[in-house]
Image (cartoon, grey):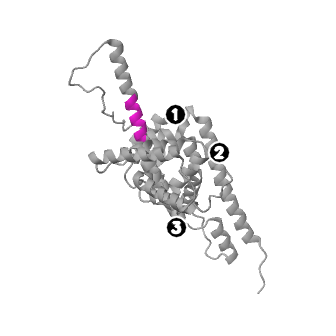
Amino acid sequence: EGTDVKPIVPALARVFDAALAGGGAKAINFNDLAADLAEITFTFPFRIPPYFALVIRAIGVLEGIALVGDPGFAIVDEAYPYISRRLLTDTSPRLRAALKYMVYGQSERFDVDRVIDMLGALERFAAVKKLADRDVDIVLTERSTGLVREADAPILDRSIVPQDEDAARDALAFFFGEDGEVFREFLLDELVKSIDAGARATLTIPRPPLASPRVTTFLAKLQPPADDDDRAAIENARKLVAFLLRNDDNVDLSSVAPSRTSASVLRQLRALSPVVNERRDDLRLFGTKLAARLAEKQLARNFDALGSLIAPATSR
């Protein structure tokens, strides 16, 4: 504490930016990362804590052994489901900042593909956890009943039970569940952007053909046309909704309306209702925040448009 770390920040940023480029954290190679960190220690006067260096070395050795048997092995790829769950659920400011950097990266633009990738990894974590719990139940049952497996039978059943297509997707249940609070707050800004952009793209204000320039300006500010950022926000929302509802086709966001929703999606939403009912107070609070942010955004736009309408005309 009190040490000036500014000189090493750019160098460390280059190391981790390179590690996170092209596929997110799964692209990290611990051997390369350790070599880059070691090079920094020779350039700048600081030391890596011994336990940290030992952990990196141990992970590098384990990854090297695994690479002998599987050239495509990546230890971070195996740990990625756990990493994703920690990032999506931990409330600590440090991990919240890490989640933001993971999703937005250097460009500070929302990367929905990374979010979908992390949600998919979270589902794999849930599946592995269910499998582990089932294996423990099998072993405990055999011990309690005195049953003995045959010599050539596997000790544990490693087959993952496929998820019911009509059940609510794990990622969707996570979003509405207790563990999804951090993720809901994280997505709040992007949800506001996509809903606002979608509303402006869908609902149009009639433009009088003979309106004065001041009225035309007022209407343009009241409902500005969608720009590239708005279209990107709408596309991000479309991709995320398609993933959560198991719809790989180019889905229109309006298709989630009851009159246009498929029977499978309706069954998923019905299966989700117990989770929603259980968390209704938290979800009501989240909905209030979302509505307030949307209202604040539109209210600021209204005042700006009204100001252009009542501003005194400039003399030429």
Q: Residues within 10 Å of mark 2 (few under 14, many from 20)?
A: few
Q: Residue at x 66, y 54 (%)?
A: 295
Magenta stretch contains residue 200:
no
Residue type at tag 2? Thr
User: In the image shown, does 101 or 300 lie closer to the viewer?
Assistant: 101
Tell me where the magenta segment starts and ends, as one range: 123-132
Residue at which label 1 appears: 275
Residue type at tag 3? Asp
Horizontal arrangement in the rendering, residue 157 relative to residue 238 (left or right): left
Q: Which mark is residue 92?
A: none
Q: Which mark is residue 228?
A: 3
Magenta stretch contains residue 124:
yes
Residue 93 visible in the snapshot: yes
Cα–Cα gap, marks 3 and 2:
28 Å
Check the picture and name the quadrant holding the C terminus.
Answer: bottom right
Q: Residues within 10 Å of mark 1 (few under 14, many from 20)?
A: some
Q: Residue at x 50, y 34 (%)?
A: 273
**Magenta segment main secondary structure:** helix
Residue type at tag 1? Val
Q: Which mark is residue 288?
A: 2
**Residue 57, x across and y down, in percent:** 43, 47
Horizontal arrangement in the rendering, residue 276 relative to residue 239 (left or right): right
